[in-house]
Image: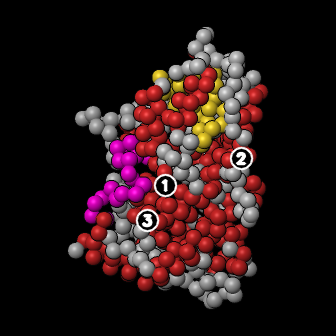
Amino acid sequence: MTALTILWLRRDLRLADQAALVAACAAGPVVPVYVLDDESPQHRAMGGASRWWLHHSLAGLGSALQAKGSRLILRRGRSEDVLQAIAEEIGTGVVHALHHYEPWWRNAERAVGKVLALHLHHGNYLVPPGTVLTGAGTPYKIYTPFWRALGERLPPAPPLAVPAAIPAPARWPISDRLEDWGLLPGKPDWAGGFRAEWTPGEAGALERLGDFADRAARYAECRNLPRVEGTSRLSPHLAFGEISPATVWHAAAGAGGSAATFLGELGWRDYAQNVILQLPAYGSTNAKPAFDAFPWRSGPKAEADLTAWQQGRTGYPIVDAGMRQLWHSGWMHNRVRMIVASFLIKHLLIDWRRGEQWFWDTLLDADYGQNAVNWQWSAGSGVDANMFVRIMAPLSQSEKFDAGDYVRMWVPELAHLPDAAIHDPPLRVRGYPAKLIGHAEGRARAMAAWGVLKG
């Protein structure tokens, strides 16, 4: 063991099941480095919610590394420039890292590989994206056959253990202070709800997984009920790589019941990476070119409606509850995500990309692949998507999935209403806005717009 190596960390902030860390430790002394790189992603730099999570995740990782006799080096700038500078400081030319598939990270990997010996490992997905192929040797674009083919390669290998020791270098490079990065909000401090609901970091991920493993058997029965803790709430931890999907898989697979439905959601996560690997601009470009001519609304009224949607002031209780939950906690129940996305796109006729950008900035679990795939699914513009003419009815969706208590929690103006009225208040309630547009009117307007597109 003589080779000094850099461990380049990005969305893989963990010690367990970390193939790059294991390989680096086997080679010799390791210098773990996190680069706050806002230059490579450009307009895809992390939003405010993700930055709050990142601060706490890095703090937790730094403590975990210290317990192993190591430390976390923090630098900011363009990844290839920072890593090359650190390599020159410590006298190495070797970097280990996990593969990432967002287009800016693939570009950064190519750039780093030109100046340093970059060794990339797999571990952020059930199987390496791009390796699940059709009989003709081409990547899948449709989820169902992709999931069927992926299933033939599952379960994933057992998770790698945390190295017993992380060899330290004789001399450490200088590190930035995490506090100096300004990742946390100042005044106003809008993260109070985040702190109340979340524990970022690997320890928090394992705690959340343990809690969900006890409930995984009833996943299918509960996951669509916003008032029930039926989902795993692991999505932010997975987005930051604080826990590997293999670890989650092996913990949930033995739960029985409907845990297999949850495993399919892990498969959807792999599918989303498969899509952006083929179509890197998926977050901003319609997969179906016909949608480039869609008559989205614009102008002051559309902008006012967008603001009302963002603030949870649409007059539709289930939509408003979801948008307020997002602002308060940085997260939204999955069924409600579908409802609010459909409402923005179809009732308000606002371009899906405006919603995708809002989610990117406000979600703690903001993930380029999943965010893009889910929004294009809702819009009907994706390679595998819901048909545009399938318009979710938010009022009946709220009643169907028993969202009364969910609405009461997030829309206190309506908390006094009985179940019979809370999904669609029959009269104006003081302090609560009127509907931006009636459901029948919104549906008719959406169908008219679709008619223009279809010619």
Q: For the residue marked with disc 1, what is the amino acid?
A: His
- The picture places residue 47, in percent across and down from the top left corner, at 58, 55
> Mark 2 or mark 3: which is in front?
2
The image's mark for residue 43 is 1
Q: For the residue marked with disc 3, what is the amino acid?
A: Trp
Query: Which residue is the extreme one toward the bottom?
Result: 427
Residue at left offset 62%, top offset 51%? 50
- The picture places residue 309, in percent across and down from the top left corner, at 55, 73
The residue tagged 2 is 180
The disc, 1 or 3, on the residue closer to the chain's N-terminal end is: 1
Mark 1 and mark 3 in contact? Answer it, CB < 8 Å.
no
Query: Which residue is the extreme one toward the left?
Result: 455
Crowd around label 3: few <14 · some 14–19 · many ≥20 (10 Å): many
Query: Which residue is the extreme one toward the top?
Result: 1
Residue at left offset 58%, top offset 85%? 434
Q: Is residue 242 above or below residue 405?
A: above
Which of 123/187 is in front? 187
- The picture places residue 192, in percent across and down from the top left corner, at 75, 59
Residue at left offset 64%, top offset 68%? 324
Which of 48/416 is in front? 48
Q: Is residue 212 above or below residue 351?
A: above
Distance from Cα at disc 1 to Cα at disc 3 = 17 Å
The image's mark for residue 352 is 3
> Mark 2 or mark 1: which is in front?
2
Residue at left offset 71%, top offset 46%? 180
Q: Which residues are magenta?
A: 272-291
Is residue 42 at least partly visible in the picture? yes
SS type, badge 3: helix
Asked if residue 268 lies in the magenta stretch, the reply is no
